[in-house]
Image (spheres, rainbow, N blue to C red):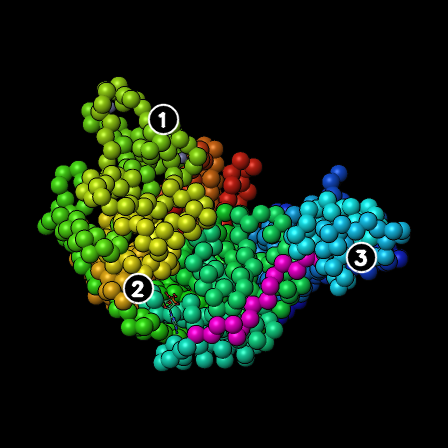
Amino acid sequence: MAQAHPSLFTHGSGADPAPVGSQRVPVLLPMPFAGPFDYKAPASMALQPGDIVSVPLGNRRETGVVWDTHNTLPPDLARPPSGKTVADNRLRSVAERLELPPLNAELRQFVDWVAAYTLSPPGMVLAMTLRLHMKGPTPTPATGWIVQPPPSELRLTPARQKVLALMADGVARTTTDIASAAGVSAGVVKGLADAGALRTVLLEPERPFAQPDPLHHPPVLEGAQKEAATALRQSVNARCFSVTLLEGVTGSGKTEIYLEAIAACLEQGQQALVLLPEIALSAQWMDRFTRRFGVRPAVWHSEIGQKARRLTWLGAADGSARVVVGARSALFLPFCNPGLIIVDEEHESLFKQEEGVIYNARDMAVLRGRLAGFPVVVVSATPSLETLANAEAGRYQRLVLPTRHGGASLPQTHLLDMRAAPPPRGLFLSPQLVEDIASTLAREEQAMLFLNRRGYAPLTLCRTCGHRMECPHCTAWLVEHRNRHVLSCHYCDHTEPMPAVCPTCKSEDSLTAIGPGIERITEEARQLFPDARILVMSSDTLGGPAATAEAVAKIARREVDLIIGTQIVAKGWHFPHLTLVGIVDADLGLGGADLRAGERTIQLLHQVAGRAGRASTPGRVVLQSYTPEHPVMQALLSGDFDQFMEQEAEQRRPGFWPPYGRLAALIISADTPQAADEAAAQFGRTAPYGEGIQVLGPAPAPLAILRGRHRRRLLLRTWRSIAVQPILHRWLGLVQVSRHVRVEVDVDPVSFL
Ligand code: ADP
Ligand code: ZN
Ligand code: ZN
């Protein structure tokens, strides 16, 4: 399999001998070129693959990485050879080698494979691993003070005496540290320095990552938990590639168990990475980790700030960051000694990055484990069909925790047939659900209402002429946000003031809100329960991670009676006093032509339901549905997730839908509908065919216009035994599109919008 493929890249190396006394090296730049460019470097620089260098490009300087002259892609993933070799005498020189740890061979190989799998330029994948603003100034090392004999007679005040007594141990300290430890002002320190009693020294570089202690606070495990923890520890100790699915109902202790796998990884001196779908919402997770290991883990996501990014990147590279918890992009950190990746909530579509390099972090985590030879653990209460099929086929080991920890029972589920007992006109909570909330609040327990829709109403309609308020840039209705008196598009940045008259027929007071968003449910709840302390949890009301953490803490402290939220509330929170969850619109999400609509709905609703009754008082879940006979509703009612997934499998198998076949989407977009149609038609005419290969489309995308661009889709579907990448390469090579047309390739699509 590990077959060398010569000259895959534009400026393939090795064709000509390098000039005497200098070295010819391919350098991959974090940009959308087809491959590395060759540069020359003086022999004295002695560059090795992985070295991070600064090179000229046009009239700029860019940071890149010395790449390998041959890569180890399997034939299926290899790119068609292209390009020419630049003559030696026209090569430009590497400007300098940067003082940064080199990217190791494992990571370089991973970059090449991800690029090849997703049909992305390798430089764009490299950009994800170089996400550290290396061009910024290197932080100056901190300086501190140590004592030295003063040159002449030193005036000794009591404050100065305190400082000298403190510093007598010879330890170097910063001004701030001295001032606070000796209880004096910074001026005293400065005075002593001026008098020659202290001299400056460079402090050791900051070691920002405290070392987690695997023995700090281990849990007591019994039964299935113990078996699962033992099995995971064995996988980690084996130090070779394996994938394990850790499955169990919400509250069964999955997190507790995979922390044991991390402990095993720490015990053997390796690094562990935990991928969470939404790290910004993980305050409770951090506390759990800290309780188990005594210190906080290193964190990686888009909001941590430049300095933290740099430290985490370097900590991953030098091994001092022993456990990193992060969003999907953490997968591209340069770990020097990785021993384990955990993918928590593996079924989450947030692991799929939909822009730039379109990749699925769960699947690429498995790839990284395979290339570098370490275990990967994927965790879920409701695993994806892809993962279940892998377990079924024996490719993944499967560990199941069947019951909630500590005897907590799973919530009882009730289906409310909204056709039989509808809410009053213009309202959205049925009498039964209202009664349930009232009695829950009367018992001084907490209740939650879930609706996965931000804003006040998803549609604003003119009662006189039927005009619908739509986004001028997208095929989408504008959503009313009543608090802010605006209509806004949830697909682009467009926002406009709520009009007073209908834009078409000019009728006054004729625009009507249709359907509920959570603002409208909140309005209804406030009228029904005027005394209840209501907390709204959505991205509109919670400004960021800190506000979210504070909201969650308030709920845990019991300062809230009724929580009303969007999918934010489904994120693994532990709310011990919550005993009732009402799903306002269980059918939402079942519409549309998404292959995984049913699977997705059941995963989300199960996750929301799992917030109820996690402590001793049993929980109740009420589903409001207009289609109670739907298999998704029936599965939620019976709790038989396995059976539902078997039915899903039976439906997907005959048509070779994933995971029983492969999919890749082409999304073509252009400024005008004509240009989009024309390009799409060309792809249609040149579509691949053959046994086990089929192309659906071209067709307008469901989001036919997005941010002013007209979008068309084609979908390639093949048997599982057929690799899509070579087919896509050939296909893309047959069509020349104009500069104004963009073609995006989405291998293993999750979104069909
Ligand atoms: P899951 O990740 O499956 O939802 P958790 O790991 O969050 O489950 O466990 C649910 C709750 O039970 C948490 O509060 C956790 O601390 C507690 N718990 C689980 N297993 C144990 C154990 N063996 N000892 C002590 N507490 C446990
Ligand atoms: Zn009108
Ligand atoms: Zn829009």
Q: Quadrant of ligand 2?
A: top left
Instruction: Name the residue tied to disc 1.
Output: 497
**Which quadrant holds the N terminus?**
bottom right
| Residue at figure coordinates x 21%, y 63% from the top left | 412
Judge whether 200 appears above or below 542 on screen.
Answer: below
Residue 355, position as x, y percentages in the image = 50, 47
**Disc 3 versus disc 1: nearer the observer:** 3
- The residue type indicated by label 2 comes to Arg
Q: Main secondary structure of the magenta part?
A: loop
Real-space CA distance between mark 3 and mark 1, rounded to the nearest whole angstrom: 66 Å
In-image side of 666 versus 635 (left or right): right
191 drawn magenta: no
- Distance (Cα) linking label 1 and label 2: 43 Å
Query: Callout 2: helix, strand or loop?
Result: loop
Residue 384 visible in rendering: yes
Residue toward you, 21 or 660? 21
For marks 2 and 3 on the same chain, the one whose residue lies earlier in the sequence: 3
From the viewer's side, name the closer residue of 20 and 605.
Answer: 605
Residue 217 shown in magenta: yes
Towards the viewer: 423 or 552: 552
**For the magenta stretch, what is the residue range?**
199-219
Residue 97 place in picture, x, y as percent: 77, 54
Find out whether the residues at labels 2 and 3 contact each other: C-beta distance under 8 Å.
no
Determine which residue is flagged by label 2.
614
Label 3: element kind = strand
Q: Is residue 261 above or below residue 361?
A: below
Give the residue pinned by disc 3: 147
